[in-house]
Image (cartoon, rainbow, N blue to C red):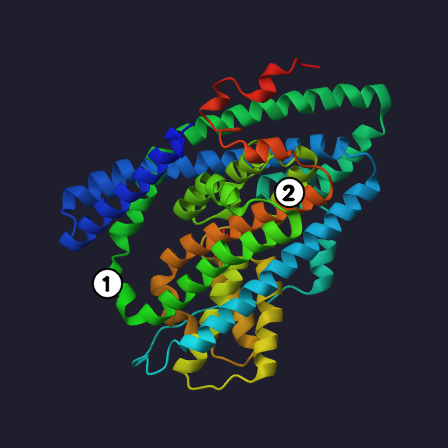
Amino acid sequence: MKSMHTLTRQIMLAMIAGIVLGSVLKLSGPPAWAQLYLLDGVLGVVGTLFVSALKMMVVPLVFVSLVTGVTALSDLRTLGRMGARALALYLATTAIAVTIALGVAGVVDPGQGFDAGPSSASFTGKDAPPLTQVLTDLVPTNPVAAMAEGNMLQIIVFALLFGMAVTMSGQRGTHVLNLFTDLNVVIMHMVEWIMRLAPYGVFALITRTFASQGLDILLPLAAYFLTLTAALAIQMFGVYPLLLRGLAGLNPLTFLKKMRDPVAFAFSTASSGATIPVTLRTVEYRLGVKNSAAAFTVPLGATINMDGTAMMQGVATVFIANVYGVDLSLTDYLMVVLTATLASVGTAAIPAVGLVTLTMVLGQVGLPVEGIALIIGVDRLLDMMRTAVNVTGDCAVSCIVAKSEQAFDQSVYDDPDAGSVEAATHPPYSTSPAP
Ligand code: ASP
């Protein structure tokens, strides 16, 4: 038994190699040929292909997997209870995350003495959509359009209804279910192909990022950067392990070890949406959450649960308040917890959107939106880290909800090799006879 699987090790090595090569290129100033043929050429193509391939799988996977998941539920009450638990935990973990972020920021006080300089920078944000629109948008007028746009909540609603109808359609429904069960296996095979290519994709993405984002830009904003990094680390290595142990009696170390792949994907793509295929695969095959729970909690979490993003918004608010010399009252802090939690629900699972929804949080406490221009320079790296936390939060909550619903296989969770891509050459699901 190895401590780390070959593929995971290759992905980690690819990340380190990408950081080194990217930083060297940045420091030395990449020669024109390297920029043209290497960074924009080969690495640009490989990185884009990798992310596109991942995104290509999201809609088919979520739809098919959710339809099979719903049909496996014994009754609708189970779905309702699971939904309520997942929602409550997603909101609670985000509120805890912002509170920790504000606590750490309160101690470090980043931004004191920061010279914003004569700033001509500007930033345009967006307003929160009214609640009525959020609710009416839940039901797609056209499910094909919802899929084409990748509107996750609408896809979830359509898949839930479709799955329920399959269950209630007797013999005919069983035919449809068999088809979807087989499709699920086929699509998972495609996801595994992409995972096998991950070392190349990750290397290309990370090299490009570090070649354009030299670490020198971090220096003036080191206090902000380090405060947020510390807060994210507390959430990842403190809060989730405690919740897993306390609410589900699960060994947190096993969890963190099995999170390496989705964390690497989230870090290099900075998109929890693009990471969904890997998150779903990890939660089901590596952590032992049954499809009936995972198919629902993972896409929901990727869409509405952004603990890392909310932490960024908490630290950024304190930083910007300090730079502009504004004192935040206790009520302001409470407002930040509330709005950052809600804003994280409304943040799309793609790169850099957290900054856009930060405008809502700043607006709530009367801070200038232009403040965002101060932190935008270091945002890419922080986006990568907070996306890793976002995805870890989705997986932790999925495990806790599944455990409480007996939709959990402890032997899979405890087996260090369960569901590894290497072991999946003869995957567990292909050994079961086709229905
Ligand atoms: N990139 C983040 C995600 O996809 C969202 C954000 O914070 O910008 O989870």
Split into 4 quadrants, where in the image is the N terminus?
A: top left
Q: Position of residue 6 (x, y in %)?
A: 37, 29
Which corner quadrant of the image does residue 206 belong to? top left
Label 2 SS: helix
Residue designated by label 1: 216
Q: Position of residue 120 (x, y in %)?
A: 34, 76
In-front residue for pair 261/41: 261
Q: Position of residue 376 (x, y in %)?
A: 38, 65
Residue designated by label 2: 146
Mark 2 surroundings: few (<14), some (14-19) or many (≥20) residues within 10 A: some
Mark 1 surroundings: few (<14), some (14-19) or many (≥20) residues within 10 A: few
Q: Is residue 124 visible?
A: yes
Could you tell me which residue is drawn at 51 percent across and 41 percent down?
A: 254
Q: Is residue 386 left or right of residue 295?
A: left
Could you tell me which residue is drawn at 49 percent across and 86 percent down?
A: 327
Label 1 SS: helix
Q: CA distance from mark 1 to mark 2?
A: 42 Å
> Where is 129 relative to 329, above or below?
above
> Where is 95 relative to 153, above or below?
below
Q: Earlier in the sequence, mark 1 or mark 2?
A: 2
